[in-house]
Image (spheres, rainbow, N blue to C red):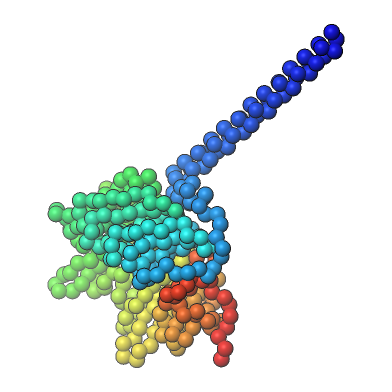
Amino acid sequence: MAETHDFEKLRKKRRRGILLRRIAVLFAISLAVMGVLSLNNLLVSFGSAGTMSDFLRGFGGGGYPIEAPGGSLRDVREVNGDIAIINDTNLYIYNDRGKEMLNIQHPGENAILLAGGGRVMTYAVGETGYRIYSRSTQLLDETGKYPLTAAAMGETGNYALVSATRQYAAQVTVYDVKFEQVFQWSSSELVAGVALGPGGKMMAAGCVGASGGIISSSVQLFSFDQKSAVARLDIPGELIAMIEFLSDSLLGILTDKGFHVMDGSGKITATTSFGGESLKAERTDGYGDVLILTESAGSRTQTVRLIDSSGEERGRFHPEAWVLDMQLGGREIYFLTVEGIICCDRELKPVMTIESGGASRILAAGGRVYYFNPEEIGVLERKEVEP
């Protein structure tokens, strides 16, 4: 009898142990699920990394080079260290190991590609629709009432749309990362471009008009908690090409005549003149530095200027070979030319010339520089061209 009693006690103890282990496993699974859901909600709320789909699909990849998607290359952008490519038919996104995360048809051959806050937007001037994607999935496919004339994406995942309406020359609408409208402004002037502030609470609009047959531009600065502009700057005789926040308090304004830095009160704090040269291209690095390429029509020479966030010219470079593309890297600046890729330091002093791999475009992303040619996408190797 004693042996039977001891056996029953042992069996009950074993059952209790199994039950406790099962409860512990279920509790651990519940905590893991709650953690994943909380992380996903947090990522979506702050617009960083996109969705949990990005996280899960971001694993893997056999490395670069990879086969090019084909078609006619239209544009390339960085998306949180990954690369987005748009050709005449599709949008592609690849991670830093060459894995295809997204391959989806875009609205049309005139689609424009924008990126910001870990998201991508495609739209076309004159069309009413636009789409927004994370790095692995389509998040929004929207059609508005009026045709779009410009758009912008911010660092927080917010975005702005410029439309031509029946009542106004332009109407700017800003949406947050959850696609909810947070600001709207209507203008009797044409809006050539918009920029969103780093903190997601401000916007700048570049307007273009004419007075007495002379082109005139203006920039207006808005805070989303106020209905009217908090500052305005008029720039007579110049045509705005680009505006961008250099910091929370400074705005960079690129025109056909030069580059201006405007403070929060609407005053110009620095100006760089192009000296009669024609503006050809610009690049920014997201940290306030601006790279500007100009061309002299008479002598067929090019000039590159590097301007920092305060408006100071940090360097000037006259490339001997014709520049086809350029990128601001972390410590270096790269120029794709007909003779190779020229690598310069952050003062625009040439360091070396790298083999281009037959590239038609280059892109600095995630600490690397990628090249794109009709056959492949690869990462540049620091292999100097033989003299």
159 horizontally vs 68: left or right: left
Q: Is residue 271 above or below residue 123?
A: below
Name the residue located 46 percent from the left edge and 80 percent from the top edge. 358
Where residue 71 sits, quadrant-wise, is bottom left
Residue 74: percent from left, percent from top: 35, 69
Q: Is residue 9 above or below residue 280?
A: above
Residue 337: percent from left, percent from top: 44, 82
* Residue 218 seen in this snapshot: no
Where residue 169 sits, quadrant-wise, is bottom left
268 horizontally vs 169: left or right: right
Name the residue located 42 percent from the left edge and 75 percent from the top edge. 374
Residue in front for this viewpoint, 152 or 84: 84
Outermost residue on the top side: it is: 1
Name the residue located 44 percent from the left edge and 60 percent from the top edge. 93
Residue in front for this viewpoint, 65 or 218: 65
* Residue 101 seen in this snapshot: yes
Residue 243: percent from left, percent from top: 34, 65
Q: How many marks?
A: 0
Q: Is residue 250 above or below residue 156?
A: below
Residue in front for this viewpoint, 140 or 10: 10
Name the residue located 30 percent from the left edge and 75 percent from the top edge. 256
22 horizontally vs 145: left or right: right
Quarter in which the N terminus is drawn: top right
Quarter in which the C terminus is drawn: bottom right
Residue 375: percent from left, percent from top: 45, 74
Where residue 310 sits, quadrant-wise, is bottom left
